[in-house]
Amino acid sequence: DRGPINPERLIGGGTWSAYWYNGYIYSSEIARGLDVLELVPTTMLTQAEIDAARLVRVAELNVQNQQRIVWPRNLIVAKAYLDQLERSQTLPADRIAAMRLAIGKAEVSQKDRGKLKNFVPSLRKVSASTKKAAEASRLTALAEILERPA
């Protein structure tokens, strides 16, 4: 927040609208013009989630179209899903740590990618038993990435 436009009297201002576009947030501010913002990690947004968001690219953006975003089957996206599952405490910490370690090895060595499939059955089992739809979707998406990472 940049503070008041005028500390002596009330003047209308603030963000009119904000849109994500290719890794940045563009905000049209009523009184001051255009803001271009870049996401930074916080307790509620990790670097892996930011990196995953940067993978999605569009040639042009018309927010009226509400374009569907399809996440690539990429290990960067898998790490973002793990961060979300950790934050929601959907999976035990030791399981998340084991998957992070395996993903790290798979990023370095192509031969280690096949070992990621070992996590798929347990992810599908937890996905089928969870009562939270958002968590089930994340678990399923993570399983699909680990089964066949791009």
Image (cartoon, rainbow, N blue to C red):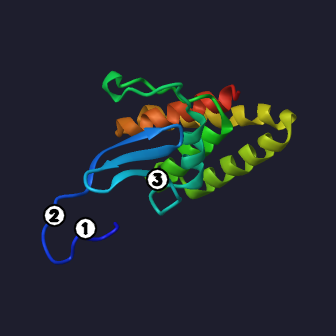
Q: Residue furthest left?
A: 10
Q: Quadrant of the C terminus?
A: top right
User: How many numbered circles does the render carry?
Assistant: 3
Q: How far, Cα to Cα, is label 3 from label 1?
A: 19 Å
The residue drawn where x is 63% and y is 29% is: 73
Q: Is residue 88 at least partly visible in the picture? A: yes
Residue that mark 1 sits on: 5
Q: How far, Cα to Cα, is label 2 from label 3?
A: 23 Å
Residue that mark 3 sits on: 37
Image x and y of residue 33, in percent: 34, 51
Report the side of 119 relative to 83 (left or right).
right
Residue that mark 2 sits on: 11
Q: How far, Cα to Cα, is label 2 from label 1?
A: 7 Å
Q: Amino acid at mark 1?
A: Ile
> How dense is the environment of label 2, judged by Cα within 10 Å: few (below 14), some, or many (20 and up)?
few
Image x and y of residue 52, in percent: 58, 41
**Sequence-wise first label, 3 or 1:** 1
The residue drawn where x is 53% and y is 31% is: 141
